[in-house]
Image (cartoon, rainbow, N blue to C red):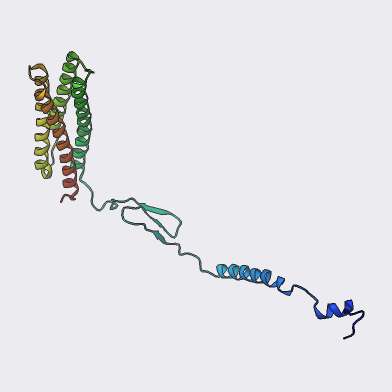
Amino acid sequence: MELKGGQLTSNEQMAVNPDPKPGRWILPLVVLGMVAFTYFFVSALPEASPDTTITGTEDTTTTTTTSDGTTETTQPGTDNGTDTIDPEAQAYIDALDEINAELQVLSTRMVAVNAGFDAEPREIEFSEAVERFESIISDTTDLEARLSDLSVPASLEINHEFLTNAMDVAVSSAQEALTGLQSTDTGELRRSAAEAFTNAVDDFDSEVTNARNAASGTDA
């Protein structure tokens, strides 16, 4: 190799090192190869089965897609009609639900009037409290009559007895609350009667649940 003035000629320099950074083409080629491999790999995967079931954990919705493209959804707690309530029992339970809903409202009214009369300063005066108690008594008595008029399925007669007992306590407690209000009692009789009323309403609610479970065959 000849030197001119102590340096290689330009032709000789190119022959020794034609590309000063030969590794710069390796990374793009590797990335391109990975992309191509991924594309062909995914394209080769088989299609999903037309019948698929998506099932979550307990108490989740299950969706099934059939081969014709339609879907069937099963809600948690349902059995697609394998454990139904007969029409007579269902009508009875529906009526109980209506009575129970109204009774819960009366319980809220009882708590409100009792607390309002005891408030400092008093939020509900004596005459208004009397009217509210009388209204609660009247409405509760009407619910008692509706409960008595229900057609009770033979399989739920025992449940109906418990419901009747709870309603009787609610009516008598509402009457006692008014009696306590109008007496010379310091308020203990009225407060005790109001508490007994709300407890009876809670008992009624529990017995409605028990009747529903008995009608559907899910009672413990």
**Which quadrant, please, contains the N terminus?**
bottom right
Query: Residue farthest to the left?
Result: 184
Query: Residue farthest to the top?
Result: 127
Residue 193 or residue 62, whichever sits in front = 193
Quadrant assignment, res 208: top left
> Seen in the image, is 42 located left or right of residue 187?
right
Where residue 120 appears, as percent x and y from the top left, is 22, 20
Quadrant assignment, res 31: bottom right
In this view, 170 is above or below 46: above
> Seen in the image, is 86 located left or right of residue 192?
right
Where residue 159 appears, as percent x and y from the top left, is 11, 41
Where residue 44 appears, as percent x and y from the top left, is 55, 70
Quadrant assignment, res 206: top left
In this view, 183 is above or below 80: above
Query: Residue farthest to the right?
Result: 4
Residue 168 or residue 18, whichever sits in front = 18
Residue 144 or residue 108, whichever sits in front = 108
Where residue 84 appears, as percent x and y from the top left, is 23, 49
> Seen in the image, is 16 located left or right of residue 220?
right
In this view, 184 is above or below 75: above
> Seen in the image, is 182 located left or right of residue 53?
left
Residue drawn at x 20%, y 27% is: 111
Figure disc tally: 0
Query: Residue farthest to the front?
Result: 6
Residue drawn at x 84%, y 77% is: 14
Residue drawn at x 20%, y 39% is: 93
Residue 130 or residue 15, whichever sits in front = 15
